[in-house]
Amino acid sequence: MIKKARIVVLDVRPYLRKKLEPFKLIMDAVSSLEPKDILVLHATFKPTPLFGVMKVKGYTHKVEEIDEQYWIVAFARDVGAKEQLDVLQLRELAIWEEEERPDEYKSGRT
């Protein structure tokens, strides 16, 4: 039986909007992860350079563009977490500020 992975959420969009570099914040979050954890990262762009850094650390990823300037990436390294990553619906994990929420999300979905 596969133990359910814990999802750790990190939203770096406020840092990126202020032109601040969130790399240390991301790496601090990564260093605190347990092997079965999944890191869900919210960003304003597809963080392609991060994929290579995380691969070296043993992580695989799943990425989805949610909206203009809104990407969600999930990272996992344990086999069980990777399997859960495959079925994880990233769009369902979207975090919206009310003023940026697209119309299709205003009917109670977040």
Image (cartoon, helix red, strand yellow):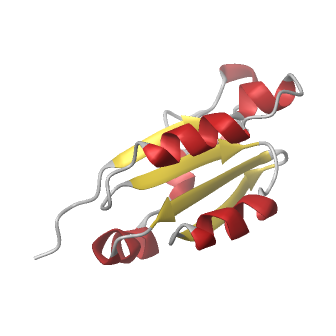
Q: Residue at x 71, y 41 (%)?
A: 23
Q: Residue at x 57, y 54 (%)?
A: 91
Picture quadrant where residue 11 is located: top right
Position of residue 29 relative to residue 88, above or below, is above
60 or 65: nearer the viewer: 60
Position of residue 52 relative to residue 40, above or below, is below
Position of residue 66 relative to residue 110, above or below, is below
Q: Residue at x 10, y 76 (%)?
A: 1
* Residue at far left of view: 1
39 or 110: nearer the viewer: 39
Q: Residue at x 49, y 33 (%)?
A: 108
Picture quadrant where residue 100 is located: top right
100 or 106: nearer the viewer: 100
Q: Where in the figure is residue 60, as x and y percent of width and height?
A: 54, 73
* Residue at far right of view: 19
Q: Where in the figure is residue 20, as x and y percent of width and height?
A: 83, 27
Residue 110 shown left or right of residue 102 in the figure? left
Q: Where in the figure is residue 5, as x and y percent of width and height?
A: 28, 58
Picture quadrant where residue 53 is located: bottom right
Please say whether residue 110 is visible from this viewpoint: no
Please say whether residue 7 is visible from this viewpoint: yes
**How many marks are shown on the rendered structure?**
0
Position of residue 31 relative to residue 10, above or below, is below
Q: Where in the figure is residue 90, as x and y percent of width and height?
A: 53, 57
